[in-house]
Amino acid sequence: MAKDKILVIGACGQIGVELTLALRKIYGSANVVASDLREENELLKGTGPYVSMDVMNKEMLHVQVIRQNITQIYLLAAILSATGEKNPNLAWHLNMQGLLNVLDIAREEQLDKVYWPSSIAVFGPTSPKRFCPQQTVIEPTTVYGISKYAGEFWCNYYHQRYGVDVRSIRYPGLISYKSAPGGGTTDYAIEIYLEALAEKKYKCFLNEDSYLPMMYMPDAIRATIELMHAPAKQISVRTSYNISGMSFSPKEIAASIQKHIPEFQLSCESDYRQAIADSWPQSIDDTVANKDWGWKPEFDLDKMTADMLGNLKK
Ligand code: NAD
Ligand code: SER
């Protein structure tokens, strides 16, 4: 049996850096090829192979997959919700064509597995606000959400029609300290920690009571790897799995920070991102992921705050 050889596309982004490093620990440095449009991230340098690549260039992607004997692709290149609303055409084009390029090559080269993340952004104002279930009314109102929902059905189609073993998670807003976020509505929950340490105050672009589903990056990386390692027969969802970590508002994250920095002050002035946040659910029901492959989060808000502040201080 051929050994696993992984290509991570979008490896220099918020998730890509940490996921690449985690995969290199499991599969060995030489067996995880990082790739991105950007220059190699400092944290990746010297940890394994890197190729500069545009996922929109299908020919070059195909050549790399063959040349490097790739057996699995993790596709992370995308335009997120807030940036997507500024350039809807670009977001649609990258988020759709990038995925179709990868799915086609996975089919042609009979790759073992593909990972592609979706988002809570698939849900819209008509979805249930609390404990939003796996299957429900889904009418997204952002171009990002529309592209993720369409992407979920392309994944399902390639699985049903061509047998591509593609797996997916609807990540909540992800919070991390290693690499910068890439233009999402939930990015405030990272900025707030940085500003709390640097300035002891933060002006949030969402209202203080905007309650959203969130997750700490170590949980998100573990979820991704657990899903990819689960036996295929346990995967009942071939669109994308709901997973839940925690839910909080700017006011609640500020209170959690004040336990460590009592003088910290939050002010709020909402902008265009408020409408995006208002369209999403406040919390997620992840019963199906728990039942199929045993998903369980480890971090709650206070545990994450202590870890974020401790690591950012270093
Ligand atoms: P990010 O913006 O931080 O990283 C994306 C990376 O893709 C960047 O390094 C960028 O340079 C690269 N890229 C962009 N266009 C490319 C192209 N044409 N070819 C190759 N690389 C290209 O995003 P992220 O936060 O790491 O998100 C990764 C994935 O997870 C995306 O699909 C995103 O929608 C999804 N997701 C993220 C979150 C979150 O909170 N971060 C939540 C839900 C879903
Ligand atoms: N964190 C992401 C965003 O805000 C959710 O997919 O766009």
Image (tube, grey):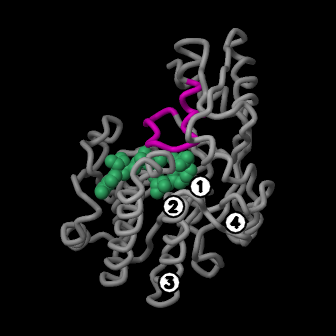
Q: Tag 4 or tag 3, which sits nearer the N-term?
A: 3
In which quarter of the view is residue 256 placed? top right
Q: Which residue is mark 2?
A: 117
Q: Amino acid at mark 4?
A: Ala
Q: Position of residue 90 (x, y in %)?
A: 35, 57
Q: Nearer the viewer, mark 2 or mark 4?
A: 2
Q: Nearer the viewer, mark 3 or mark 4?
A: 3
Q: Amino acid at mark 1?
A: Tyr
Q: Is mark 1 within 8 Å of ligand 1?
A: yes
Q: Is residue 108 left or right of residue 79?
A: left
**Discs 3, 4 touching: Cβ within 8 Å:** no
Q: Tag 4 or tag 1, which sits nearer the N-term?
A: 1
Q: Is mark 2 within 8 Å of ligand 1?
A: yes
Q: Position of residue 151 (x, y in %)?
A: 49, 70
Q: Which residue is mark 3?
A: 157
Q: Is residue 279 left or right of residue 6?
A: right
The answer to whether residue 301 of the structure is visible from this angle is: yes
Inter-mark Cα distance, 2 to 1: 7 Å
Which label was assigned to residue 289?
4
Residues shaded magenta? 177-193
Q: Is residue 115 left or right of residue 137?
A: left
Q: Which residue is mark 1?
A: 171
